[in-house]
Amino acid sequence: MIRWMCGVSLADRLSSEELRRRVGVEGIGIVLRRHRLRWFGHVERKEDVNWVKRCTNVIVGGPTPIGRPRKTWQSSMSDDMRLLGVNARDATDRAKWRRAIGRKQANPEQTGQRP
């Protein structure tokens, strides 16, 4: 869609990164990370007796499938928090958490992106 908006075809050999920069659109990975962390902060601020918060620590039994283990919600959260330099304790302070995850450039791998 962004290529169509810019009037660029694949033959023009412009990267998706460059086109997103031109249009001012964030990558889907960045947006998903921010939404996951926003939900994580919401759940972390809930009381410990809340069923949603209790579900975050549920261990599902059953046979272990062959191969690499599936990525868990906790591992995704720890990866996202490590990338942004925040921890779970920061989520208790809503204003601080929103500042930490709400930045337009929430992807430390990208440099030189417009704010």
Image: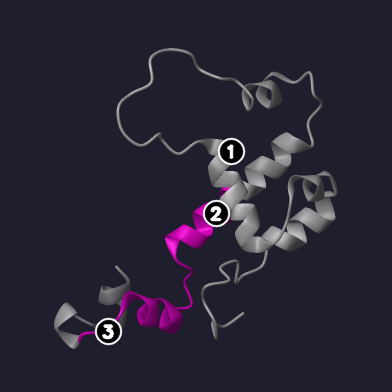
Gap in angstroms between the C-alphas marked 3 and 2? 25 Å
The amino acid sitting under disc 1 is: Gln
Give the extent of the magenta segment: 13-36
What residue is shown with label 3?
14
Q: Secondary structure at mark 1?
A: helix
- Left/right of residue 15 with respect to residue 51 in the rendered view: left
Label whose residue precedes the other's in the sequence (3 or 2)? 3
* CB atoms of marks 3 and 1 within 8 Å: no
Name the spot of residue 35 as percent of width and height, x first: 58, 50
Q: Which quadrant holds residue 63?
A: top left
Q: Is residue 89 magenta?
A: no
Number of other residues with Cα within 10 Å of mark 1, as a class: few under 14, some 14 to 19, many 20 or more: few
Q: Which mark is residue 15?
A: none
Number of other residues with Cα within 10 Å of mark 2, as a class: few under 14, some 14 to 19, many 20 or more: many
Q: Secondary structure at mark 3?
A: loop
Number of other residues with Cα within 10 Å of mark 3, as a class: few under 14, some 14 to 19, many 20 or more: few
